[in-house]
Image: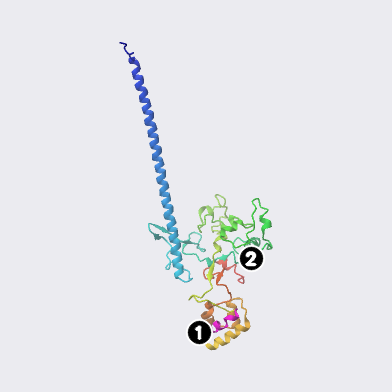
Amino acid sequence: MRRGRDIPAARRPARRGTILIVTLWIVLVLAGLTLMLARAMRVEAVCAANELAALQAEAIEQGAVQYVLSRVDSLQGELPTETDAPCEVVRVGAGAFWILRPDYENDDACAYGITDEAAKANLNIAPVEMLAKLPGMTQELAASVVDWRDGDANPTPGGAESEYYLLLPEPYQCKDAPLETVEELFLVKGFMPEILFGEDVNRNNMLDANEDDADISAPSDDRNGSLDRGLAPFVTVHSVEPNISADGERRVNLNDPQSQQPLFDLLREKLSVDRAIVLTDRVRRERPFRNVLDFHIRAGLTPAEFQAVADHLTTNPASVLRGLVNVNTAPRAVLASLPGLD
């Protein structure tokens, strides 16, 4: 019987060593895979947490919008005060929000509260003369805004229509339609970030250290200790209000001959029958009126009479009024741009 060949004793430890090395490599690979899996799980956990935080932030944002709408709607057009609508650390579930507005008299801090869009100049309504008086604006910039928003292809002196925009390195047509956002001005000839935002590049309505250090850090500024806010805080595209009185009634149009009887009824109710007869006759003879104040002056109302009827009258047949400026809330820069206040 043939005997099998014996394995030399000296080779057995080498085979065991090989098995050990292979085992160590397998353990190392498994450990690496485990670490990779753990890292992937950690990344997934962080991503899930970020997504949850984003959803929570979005929910808080929507809650803030609904909060503002409810408070504003309940005040029938009056600007909410801090008592009417607290705007600092308003809790929504486990989160909170703050509503900030510019404090035009203080460059070192912002204020809490709801901003009145009617305190700003409406880019789609304001005439070129008014736009040109706003901070950072020139006659050419104002003319370019008017050309961008109007419906014709005729350039305003100093402005630009499609002939200009089509010659740009990346050409496009002049919109010839109302602006939808303030930032749309970047498409208009001549507008740069420093015109729109001034030194306030982060748009927090406060003078930060980098906004008052000359050219040490961006942006470039004049280091004069005051904040150049640019144009953006003083303009809007959203100012609109219904053409109704504070009690929700449709206003009487002084320039409409068909409103003679409603006007008489209003004046009789608010003043007297005798004054109603006199004033309606004057309106019939004096119309059209430029505005309600023009009616006050030309019809000879006393201040008390005007106060009693002013909110119930209009000279505009539109159901909504766009671009009116609230002189009670407008900052100085906007008031200074109003026609006739030179």
**On screen, residue 331 above or below 246:** above
Name the quarter where the C terminus is drawn. Answer: bottom right
Residue position marked by numbered label 2 in the rendering: 128
* Magenta stretch holds residue 140: no
Residue drawn 41% across and 55% down? 56
Instruction: Count residues near mark 2 (Cα–Cα under 10 Å), then give few for <14, some for 14-19, many for 20+.
Output: many
Q: Which mark is residue 45?
A: none
Q: Which is the main secondary structure of the residues drawn in magenta?
A: helix
Instruction: Count residues near mark 1 (Cα–Cα under 10 Å), then give few for <14, some for 14-19, many for 20+.
Output: few
Q: Position of residue 106 (x, y in %)?
A: 50, 62
Q: Nearer the viewer, residue 242 or 95?
A: 242
Residue position marked by numbered label 1 in the rendering: 269
Q: SS for tag 2?
A: helix
Can residue 324 be seen at all in this image of the molecule?
no
At label 1, the amino acid type is Glu
Q: Position of residue 327 (x, y in %)?
A: 54, 70
The residue positioned farthest toward the left in the image shown: 1
At label 2, the amino acid type is Val
**On screen, residue 139 above or below 12:** below
Residue drawn 46% across and 68% down? 72
First to last magenta residue range: 255-270
* Magenta stretch holds residue 262: yes
Name the quarter where the N terminus is drawn. Answer: top left
